[in-house]
Amino acid sequence: MAATPALDAILERLNPEQRAAAVHGQSPLLIVAGAGTGKTTTLAHRVACLIDRGIPPERILLLTFTRRAAAEMLRRVDGILRELSGAATSSVTASRRVWGGTFHAIGTRLLRQHGKLLGLPPEFTVLDRSDSEDLIHVLRDELKLAASGTRFPLKGTCLSIYSRSVNAQQPLTRVLDESFPWCAEHQPALKQLFNAYVDRKEQLGILDYDDLLLFWRELAVHARAAEALRAQFDCVLVDEYQDTNVVQAAILKGIVPDGVGLTVVGDDAQSIYSFRAATVRNILDFPQHYPGSTVLTLQQNYRSTMPILQATNAVIAAAAERHCKDLWSSRTDGDSPSLVLCMDEDEQTDYLIDRILEHRENGVPLKQQAVLFRASHHSMALEVELARRNVPFHKYGGLKFVETAHVKDLLGFLRLAENPRDVVSGQRVLVLLPGIGQVRARSLLTTLAEHRGDFGVWNDVKPPKAAGASWKEFVSLMTGLRNVRRTKLTDQVHRVRSFYAPLVEQHYDNVRARLKDLEQLELVSGRFSDRMQFITEMTLDPPSSTQDLAGDPLLDEDYLILSTIHSAKGLEWNSVYVIHAADGNIPSDMATGNPDEIEEERRLLYVALTRAKDRLYVTMPQRYYFQGRFRGDAHGYAQPSRFLTRDALQHFRTEVAFFERPDEVDSTSAPHFTTGDVRSRIKSTWE
DNA sequence: CTGACTCGTGTTTTT
DNA sequence: CACGAGTCAG
């Protein structure tokens, strides 16, 4: 292709492999990009090149793993385009026209656009994980499955089984045998439940997360729709391809059957989402799926120092199956990573905070430091201590703001108004009202459905005594919300909040914090133009939790990052602390069932370690106190993660976190007073 | 039928 | 411990 001179100059900044990827033509392309090898930079340059080559931005589809990643990528594209055109404003809007987002978000958008071809109403609502569980729960009751004597799997387990089956496209028997053997005896009942689940979603006009992919795939193979989709895009780029599942691969195959214009990027060594049915085979077999494809491998690491890379290379070298990659860096100097043995969790916490503050003193801002862990609750003790010491932090992963009961309640009102057939939201909202329980809620919703979602019929219902005046108020709120679709969204949220606030006090503890969250939500809603968009975005791209523990991080310029390893994917920081690196946590003892799971845990540790640019600490408490049943000082001893092999440990400096104990005596100074003084003071309390 | 209560069990990662 | 399932008094 003929690049303009200016573009050539910009591409000079890339290394040869990166440049080859950026300027590659339309034949199928796989970029195997090791950790920190400038994957985002490369992809951004490729998108810029495509636009520069005259491909209309709205005909480019960029699929990423998170919305943040898409935004970051397009920001970089903007930068490059602006350089090219000498700050012309047109380029800024150009990248905004690119279709960028997660598979689920893009799927939603395309299904609203083309869903009619499948008979799907464009105003469908989307269930998040816990909504889906609630629906399963309702159906389980209706089918009386739990009452059959033997204990039936919990709603969450049922949904996991269902989800695995559809995402891996595997028959139920196989999923049960391989992943849920203890539920095998319930196979017939589960089949019945899943059929009901699929039918009910159809009746209610709702889709769950998995449906967004499944329906999109149907769209992509459905003759007329597929044509429209294929005609819509010239180029499709997929990031984090190692974490896609077979349904996602089928979607791509449908949109781009011959792979012309298709680019996928990923690193098999960082595949960590098999619990969501992602399969590393997608990236490994890409050349077979798309004959004539080009494979480019990026191996020069621009992120970490060589001592850190030597350690991470050694950790991944022990993996059972991997693409050979030998990451290297020109940053040869730097400190060896530390393995820090702490006596117990408290000492680990103290050690961390001391190090973090020390680094900050030395000019590394808190935002450039991250504490990473396997499970969300691993940071609890640290969070408490950070709050006590007034160190601001922001936590990614774990329970999100929108998953808290009160936020879901408030959104429930809006969702019911948007789609009165949505009985999941309906139940949720109705049982909040005094005097209304499961049974009455169900009958009210049936009545509502019989009157085509006209909330007015509820005026004729005899309200339960306990409901009092609030029933009339509730009905008028809902009719209002139904009719005033044009009212400003914040006003709608405000009305719901006024009605709902008193109910918070009746149903939950910690009322103040929850009411503050609701205020926050009203504020957030101001950023959205219409209600449907607001509801959908909140389930597909929920904001990470507001941290009220350590003050509002938005007000603080600088804050420390706490993150699960899963949520840290693709990110990097100057100083990284991987905590609770004991066997049983990494690998989690929930995930040591089969060799594949263990291998994934190894990659998980690899992902964590490769986030570090300059300084890497791996810490673990050696003594764990048992939680729960046995109180007192019962404890056990932990071993370092099995993935820190002898070979890997050669690249670590092992230290023991000793703390200056307060009992270290300063023998040089004379006593200010005697023990006799102390005793007389004690006596004075009752004298 | 609702809502307050007790009892027992299981416990990761996320769109 | 925290949540879900099951029990029982209004």
Image (spheres, coloured by chain):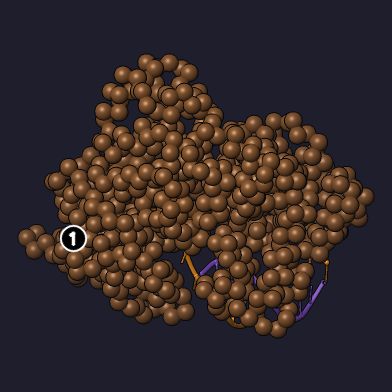
Chain colours: A brown, B orange, C purple
Along the line of sight, the residue nearer the viewer: A302 or A148 = A302
Q: Furthest residue to the left?
A: A668
- Which corner quadrant holds the N terminus of chain A? top left
Q: Badge 1 local density, few (<14 within 10 Å), some, or many (20+)?
A: many
Which residue does the image show at 19% across and 66% down from the upper left?
A647
Q: Is A147 placed above or below A395 here?
A: below
Q: Is A312 placed above or below A54 here?
A: below
Residue B1 % position (x, y): 83, 66
Can you tell which quarter of the image residue A363 is in?
A: top left
Which residue does the image show at 56% across and 70% down from the upper left?
A175
Q: Is A682 placed above or below A573 here?
A: below
Along the line of sight, the residue nearer the viewer: A259 or A400 = A259
Would you say residue A358 is visible in this rendering?
no
Can you tell which quarter of the image residue A313 is in?
A: bottom left
- Which corner quadrant holds the C terminus of chain A? bottom left
Q: Amino acid at mark 1?
A: Phe
Which residue carries the number 1 mark? Answer: A652
Secondary-structure class at tag 1: loop
